[in-house]
Image (cartoon, rainbow, N blue to C red):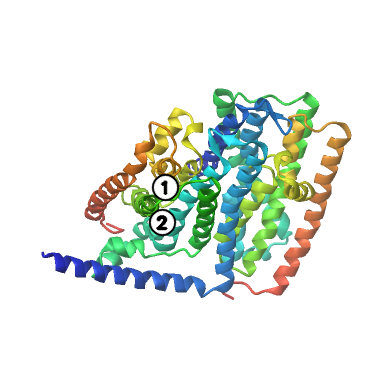
Amino acid sequence: MTWSMNLSRLRGNARLYAKLQLIQLRTVVEYRADFWIGILGASLMHGAGLVFIVALFGQIDELGGWSAWEVAVLYGLTLIPAGLRELFADGPWLLRSLVNSGEFDRLLVRPVSPAMQVATRLASIHGVGQLSLGLTLLILGTTRSGMDWTLWKAIFLLVSVLSSLGLLIAIGFLVNMIGFWEPSAQSAIPTAYAMLIDFAKFPLDIYSNVIKVLVTVVAPYAFISYFPALVLLDKETPWRWLGFASPLVTLLAVLLTSWLWRKALNRYQGVGH
Amino acid sequence: MTTLFNILITFIWVFILYALWDAAFSETGAIAGYSWDEMRTYILLAYGINALVGWRVASQMMGTIRTGEITRELTRPLNYRSTQLAAAAGMSVVEGLISLVLILVLGTLLFDVQPPDSPVAAALFAVALLAGFVIKALCIFLISLLCFWTLNSVGLMWAQQAVISVLSGTLIPLAMMPGALRVVAEVLPLRGIVSTPLQIYLGKAQGWDLAGLLALQFGWLAVLWFFSDWAWRKAFNAVEIQGG
């Protein structure tokens, strides 16, 4: 295959992706009350965490060497990619019920890649709340903590947010693919794994070694917030260089996910066989 | 198994809070009148208590209305609010036992939890805990009535969990809240779910303070008890059933 052919296929896929997600977002806005309740619920959920931080820093000045505004940066770096993922690729969370009910059959006979169909199966508009809260915190946090903005830091920020988004989408697929092996659609393991992201909202320095290993190796959420923040805020620690490793971690996660995805598709037999 | 996991998920925040307060207390001896020993106990017990009347109870209550299954409930010659409350109590036995075991295991192995302040405190703690349980179930019942108007029960669930976790004092003790929020939390009934029982447990409320706390809690309990029944009848008359 030549480069131009690859490129035009990629463009076609991107256009299709945008179209499918737009339809999903429209269906949500169709029901006004439901739409607002969703936004309200999500905002309150993330607002609760914020209330906690405000209260905490009302009592103390510093947390493990991090100021309130520096923690706000961590919070923002966590919320932004999480909000983007909810907005543009919440579909994998329906994967288990698709496989469980056998509806996944239908995806396989359509002339579009099943992975894309799964990713565009759901777009959660309430991601907007998380995204805007995250942006606010990041902007406030970086300006108030006296961070020096340079061009390369802006580029670094953009790259690390995009790679965080990639990592979260890969994890979304990865944890929900358990449905291909473990038929119970009720399993709470995916939710638990996804919730470990909350650890990334605070500096790693305060955790015990078990938790440090957990969020660096087992569920690498530290590569979304903590390690990039070390670079952005010029923190002097021996682990600072790991901030540059974020795209590499994402690449590994994507490779692992696509390898397992192919195994899963080969394994899938439909229901009732 | 699923229930166990759902409770474990909420305990992720117990570990986060433990680490946060551990770091905070390494600099000072006491924060807003709490020592590190008391704070540890507070964190673990607060989450254990708030795990009662969890996700399952709320989704059950909302689901009954959302799916239209409520029509079947109405054919029974029983008070709807009371039957829902009884069902919540039944489900909470399982959740309660699991979180009790978790608290005992974590409490002895990791958290080094303090015993109740005195035998009297222990007894009153149990009373306040029970009242708090009914208050929480009634509040969730009231929220579930909104399902007559919306299908987005997940949004309601999030909103409900967030508000309760802050205003009940689960996330942070009332004494440490910033001014205005603290006033609101101290007046509302939600403090009766976690904060009031734990203040009694830790011996933070004595004498008249304690009597006042209990009076407020039981006052709200009575108000919610009658209000929920009234609101239920109003809501039922106002709207139609899904699919009918």
Of all residues, the one furthest to the left in this rendering is A1
Of all residues, the one furthest to the right in this rendering is B208
Q: Earlier in the sequence, mark 1 or mark 2?
A: 2
Chain holding disc 1: A
How far from the left and from the top, in percent, is residue B156?
Answer: 60, 60
Is residue B129 visible to the viewer in this orientation of the structure? no
Q: CA distance from mark 1 to mark 2?
A: 9 Å
Examine the rendered structure and indicate whether residue B81 appears above or below residue B202. below
Closest to the observer: A79 or B45? A79
Secondary structure beneath label 2: helix
Q: Residues within 10 Å of mark 2 (few under 14, many from 20)?
A: many
Is residue A55 visible to the viewer in this orientation of the structure? yes
How far from the left and from the top, in percent, is residue B203?
Answer: 77, 29
Residue shown at 58% from the left, 42% from the top: A68
Q: Are marks 1 and 2 on the same chain?
A: yes
Q: Are marks 1 and 2 in contact (CB under 8 Å)?
A: yes
How far from the left and from the top, in percent, is residue B141?
Answer: 68, 57
Q: Please indicate whether residue A47 sits to the left or right of residue B227 in the image.
A: left
Closest to the observer: B146 or A9? A9
Residue type, numbered disc 2: Trp
Residue at image mark 2 = A93
Q: Residues within 10 Å of mark 1 (few under 14, many from 20)?
A: some
Residue type, numbered disc 1: Pro
Residue at image mark 1 = A190
Q: How many callouts does the rendering have?
A: 2
Chain holding disc 2: A
Closest to the observer: A113 or B233? A113
Q: Quadrant of residue B117?
A: top right
Per the rendering, the mark at residue A83 is none
Position of the C terminus of chain B, as image quadrant, is bottom right
